[in-house]
Image (tube, grey):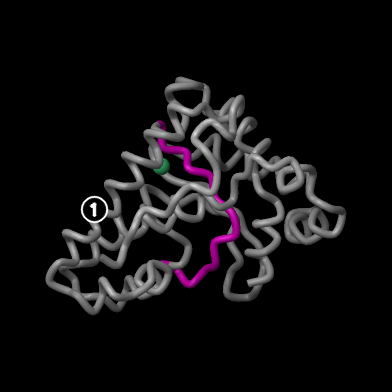
Amino acid sequence: MSYLLPELPYSYDALEPFIDAKTMEIHHSKHHATYITKLIVGLEKFPELLALDIETLVSKLNELPEEVKPVVKNHGGGHLNHSIFWSIMSPNLEDRKEPSEELKTTLGADFGGYDNFISKFKEMATNLFGSGWTWVIKNKEGKLEIKNYPNQENPLMFGEYPIMGIDVWEHAYYLKNQNRRNEYIIYWLQVVNWNEVKNRLNK
Ligand code: MN3
């Protein structure tokens, strides 16, 4: 079994009061788990693909046999997106305190400053229509961009590196925030693991 649900590096209630325990439990143990189950079923006849790590599989989307592209795009993307998502949140105050001046400079460099970077991220996530993710990506030229991708698409499918991304599917916030996606976005930004964001910038 090559694709497994990663254990959360913290308990379901660890991100309270910003992200509630029930949402975390359903999101991880049901939604994320289902992407993995469906990915494994969809790749049944392709053991060589099941043997790849998830980042490699998703990066190769365009080269894959036509019949597996949809399952890799939807469920492979779902597995990878959520694996990243859990890792870039933290209950640890040291991880989620304001980024250092150095990190703020790096994040803000392509946006006219860190405050503009945060405003743009909030605006993009608020305005994403339907289900999808707002990503901070490093493009092929090494510049940062903020982009919206629908459903479970991942930047690696487009030759971009995902630095941080917010899941704005309703399942990520509806129990707590109902239709107030903007409230969820503000709460989510309180639990971002900036140390992990920094690690991803240096990859
Ligand atoms: Mn989700």
In percent of width and height, residue 183 lies at 59, 25
Query: Mark 1, residues whose alpha carbon is within 10 Å: few (<14), some, or many (≥20)?
Result: some
In percent of width and height, residue 100 lies at 84, 53
In percent of width and height, residue 82 lies at 44, 50
Q: Is residue 22 shown above or below 158? A: above
- Identify the residue shown where x is 63% and y is 75%: 141
Q: Name the foreground residue: 91 vs 104.
A: 91
Q: Give the quadrant of residue 162.
A: bottom right
Q: Is residue 186 shown above or below 155? A: above
Extreme residue toward the right, this view? 101
Residue at which label 1 appears: 37
Q: Is residue 148 part of the magenta span, yes or no?
A: no
Extreme residue toward the left, this view? 45
- Direction from residue 143 to residue 55 in the image, left or right: left
- Identify the residue shown where x is 67% and y is 64%: 199
- Identify the residue shown where x is 52% and y is 68%: 160
Total number of numbered discs in the rendering: 1
Callout 1 secondary element? helix
Q: Amino acid at mark 1?
A: Thr
Q: Quadrant of the C terminus?
A: bottom right
Q: Give the quadrant of residue 23.
A: top left
The stretch in magenta equals 157-170
- Direction from residue 35 to residue 113 in the image, left or right: right
Ligand 1 positioned in quadrant:
top left
Q: Quadrant of the N terminus?
A: bottom left
In percent of width and height, residue 83 lies at 46, 54
